[in-house]
Image (cartoon, grey):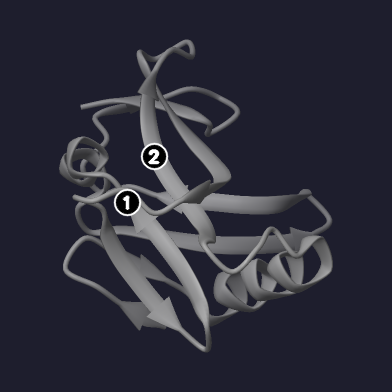
Amino acid sequence: MLNNEIINVTDKAFNQIKTIFLSENPGPQKGLRLAVVGGGCSGLQYKIEFSEHKEKDNVIENDNIRIFVDPKSSIYLKDVVLDYQDGLNGKGFVFENPNATNTCGCGESFSV
């Protein structure tokens, strides 16, 4: 598991990020941005996208793969575990957020 002061990324999630990064080849200056934005049925939702590095970003880097978290999102992502599940109940990235007081049924939005 990649441990950072903000977010923890499981090995399975990191390997999936690496696979996507290598297949899509977004460019040497880009990384995967994890963010929290307003919206969703619970008030806040997770956002994952390829993005350029911004000056104040927190950066997690391993094996030439970079993950960016902006300072505002880092408040909501503190101690979150990003995992990847590919079982019978669905496939995709899953955020395990111990700070969430309420989550929606799909797990994509939350409130604190």
Query: Does 18 sit left or right of 42 as displayed?
Result: right
Q: Viewer-proximal residue, 18 or 8?
A: 18
- Residue 111: which numbered mark, if any? none
Local crowd at mark 2 within 10 Å, few (<14), some, or many (≥20)? some
Which residue is situated farthest in the bottom direction here? 63
Q: Amino acid at mark 2?
A: Ala
Query: Does 97 sit left or right of 64 as displayed?
Result: left
Q: Quadrant of the C terminus?
A: top left
Rendered view: 105 above or below 64: above
Q: What residue do we see at 21% from left, 46% from top?
A: 74
Q: Amino acid at mark 1?
A: Val
Q: Which residue is mark 2?
A: 35
Rendered view: 46 above or below 98: above
Q: What residue do we see at 59% from left, 69% from top?
A: 28
- Residue 26 location, quadrant: bottom right
Local crowd at mark 1 within 10 Å, few (<14), some, or many (≥20)? many
Q: Earlier in the sequence, mark 1 or mark 2?
A: 2
Q: Which residue is mark 1?
A: 69
- Residue 67 location, quadrant: bottom left
Q: How many marks?
A: 2
Q: Quadrant of the N terminus?
A: bottom left
Measured from the top left, where is residue 57 in percent x and y?
25, 53
Q: Are marks 1 and 2 in contact (CB under 8 Å)?
A: yes
Measured from the top left, where is residue 35 in percent x and y?
39, 39
Helix, strand or loop at label 2? It is: strand
Q: What residue do we see at 15% from left, 41% from top?
A: 75
Q: CA distance from mark 1 to mark 2?
A: 6 Å
Measured from the top left, where is residue 96 in percent x and y?
40, 52
